[in-house]
Image (tube, rainbow, N blue to C red):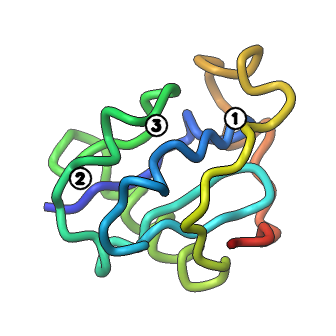
């Protein structure tokens, strides 16, 4: 099992999860985070830290696409280990549907 970040993170980018990760497997895009599925040790400490409920185990139905997505972008984006402020519209965007189509940006974040 591994954990992955889903579209609930897009346009929110809460980073509470990165500070508790013991293996630094989070990577930062401009408006979301991803987890490298091969680096995640399945400890699960990040999942309850996410205010947007965007971190899910890959054993849930429909997670295959998110494993692929997380793998692809974790190999393009910089690692993030330090908590940052969420995006300005995070509260307003939290819980929206179709965020991948509406808001996703493939550019890397700054990491750190």
Left or right of 24? Residue 76 is: right
Name the quarter where the N terminus is drawn. Answer: bottom left
Name the one closer to the observer, 20 or 62: 20
Distance CA(mark 1)–CA(mark 3): 10 Å
Q: How many marks?
A: 3
Question: x, y percentage for residue 106?
Answer: 77, 65
Left or right of 60? Residue 7 is: right
- Dot 2, how many residues are within 10 Å of its Cα: few (below 14), some (14-19), or many (20+)? some
Distance CA(mark 3)–CA(mark 2): 12 Å
Residue drawn at the location 56% of the way across and 85% of the way down: 75
Name which quarter of the figure residue 107 lies in.
Answer: bottom right
Distance CA(mark 2)–CA(mark 1): 21 Å
Circle 1 SS class: loop
- Dot 3, how many residues are within 10 Å of its Cα: few (below 14), some (14-19), or many (20+)? many
For label 2, the residue is 58
Name the one closer to the observer, 78 or 95: 78
Say whether disc 1 or disc 3 marks the residue closer to the N-terminus.
Answer: 1
Name the one closer to the observer, 81 or 4: 81
Circle 2 SS class: loop
Which label lies toward us, 2 or 1? Answer: 1
Asked if disc 3 and disc 2 are in contact, CB closer than 8 Å, the reply is no
Q: Which mark is residue 93?
A: none
For label 3, the residue is 54
Q: Which mark is residue 12?
A: 1
Residue drawn at the location 19% of the way across and 70% of the way down: 41
Question: x, y percentage for residue 83?
Answer: 61, 52
Asked if disc 1 and disc 3 are in contact, CB closer than 8 Å, the reply is yes
């Amino acid at each position: 099992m591994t954990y992955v970040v889903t579209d609930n993170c897009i346009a929110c980018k809460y980073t509470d999860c990165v500070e508790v990760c013991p293996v630094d497997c989070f990577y930062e895009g401009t408006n979301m985070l991803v987890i490298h599925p091969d680096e995640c040790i399945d400890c699960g400490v990040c999942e309850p830290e996410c205010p947007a409920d965007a971190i899910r185990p890959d054993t849930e139905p429909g997670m295959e696409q998110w494993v692929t997505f997380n793998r692809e972008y974790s190999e393009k984006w910089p690692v993030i280990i330090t908590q940052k402020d969420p995006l300005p519209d995070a509260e307003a965007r939290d819980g929206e549907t179709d965020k991948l189509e509406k808001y996703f940006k493939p550019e890397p974040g700054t990491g750190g």
